[in-house]
Image (cartoon, rainbow, N blue to C red):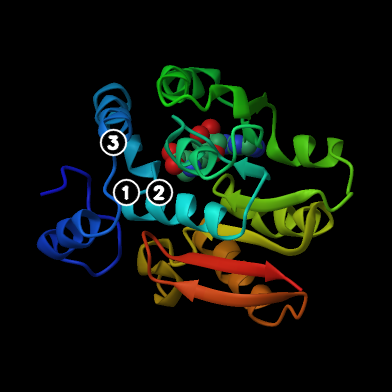
């Protein structure tokens, strides 16, 4: 059975382990990165995406033939490793985070997996890094997993960076179920609700919301 915390909403531990094992399960490097993150970070390690979401990110990157990708919110590098593995050897993944301490944990794992050369880590607020990139529609894939109250600003900027047919993957869109619980009125919950409402009416994208992990929205640029 998986020793990850259960994060795909509503799944029993047994079903979660079953679906992880019957997809592409995490290899030794990803499993060790998850274990090291738990040991060194403790409770906050829950921020790491679960293994089935990692497998999906690699799958999607390969499916769309992604060469250039950007990630907002890298933490200890699990999702970055999954995305980078889905890129060709000369591909590029720009990773945006503000924590050297956390991203330093991921680097040796990127090296071991042979994808370090594809990863360009920018230690700055994601909105600053996004603003520094030319809106030349040269990116194929984006993964949003940083500051929840900034999701809409990220998406607005990403739209100009992604090619038609490019894909935006947005994490935590169900926020542990809080989006449908009227008693939950925290800033992050309200921001995610507002983001979901706007996305649901946004005709710039084809839209799918999945119950993977903590809720995942896929947006394909029209
Ligand atoms: C949920 S975690 C990302 C988890 C990661 N995708 C993974 O799979 O392990 C959110 C990350 O956003 C980072 N962060 C916080 N404020 C930020 C900002 N303004 N710009 C970019 N990253 C930020 C945090 O340091 C943290 O590592």
Question: Vertically, is 199 above or below 215?
Answer: below
Other-residue count near label 2 (Cα within 10 Å), few / some / many at <14 / 14–19 / ≥20: many
Question: Vertically, is 60 above or below 207?
Answer: above
Q: Nearer the viewer, mark 3 or mark 2?
A: 2
In space, the residues marked 1 and 2 are separated at their CA atoms by 5 Å
Residue 193 located left or right of residue 106 = right
Find disc 2 in the rendering and name its residue: 54
Which corner quadrant of the image does residue 34 belong to? Answer: top left
Callout 2 secondary element: helix
Other-residue count near label 3 (Cα within 10 Å), few / some / many at <14 / 14–19 / ≥20: few
Please provide percent x and percent y for residue 101: 48, 18
Q: Sequence order check: which comes first, mark 3 or mark 2?
A: 3
Find disc 1 in the rendering and name its residue: 51
Check if mark 3's residue and mark 1's residue have beta carbons within 8 Å. Answer: no
Between 144 and 2, the one nearer to me in the picture: 2
Between 30 and 191, the one nearer to me in the picture: 30
Please provide percent x and percent y for residue 45: 33, 36
Callout 3 secondary element: helix
Residue 21 located left or right of residue 145 = left
Find disc 3 in the rendering and name its residue: 43
Q: Indicate yes or no: mark 2 CB to ligand 1 under 8 Å.
A: yes
Q: Residue at x 72, y 58 (%)?
A: 155
Callout 1 secondary element: helix
Q: Quadrant of the C terminus?
A: bottom right
Please provide percent x and percent y for residue 120: 66, 27
């Amino acid at each position: 059975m998986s020793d990850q915390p259960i994060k795909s909403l509503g799944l029993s531990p047994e079903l979660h382990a079953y679906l992880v094992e019957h997809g592409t399960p995490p290899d030794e490097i990803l499993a060790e990165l998850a274990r090291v993150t738990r040991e060194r970070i403790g409770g906050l390690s829950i921020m790491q995406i679960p293994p089935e979401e990692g497998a999906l990110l690699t799958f999607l990157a390969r499916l769309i033939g992604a060469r250039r990708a950007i990630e907002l919110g890298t933490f200890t590098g699990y999702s970055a490793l999954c995305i980078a593995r889905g890129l060709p050897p000369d591909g590029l993944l720009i990773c945006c985070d503000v924590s050297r301490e956390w991203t330093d944990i991921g680097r040796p794992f990127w090296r071991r997996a042979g994808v370090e050369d594809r990863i360009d880590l920018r230690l700055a607020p994601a909105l600053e890094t996004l603003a520094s990139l030319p809106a030349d529609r040269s990116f194929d894939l984006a993964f949003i997993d940083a500051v929840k109250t900034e999701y809409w600003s990220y998406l607005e900027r990403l739209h100009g960076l992604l090619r038609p047919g490019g894909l935006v993957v947005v994490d935590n869109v169900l926020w542990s179920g809080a989006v449908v619980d009227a008693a939950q009125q925290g800033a992050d919950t309200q921001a995610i609700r507002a983001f979901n409402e706007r996305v649901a009416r946004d005709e710039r994208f084809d839209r799918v919301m999945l119950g993977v992990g903590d809720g995942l929205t896929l947006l394909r640029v029209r």
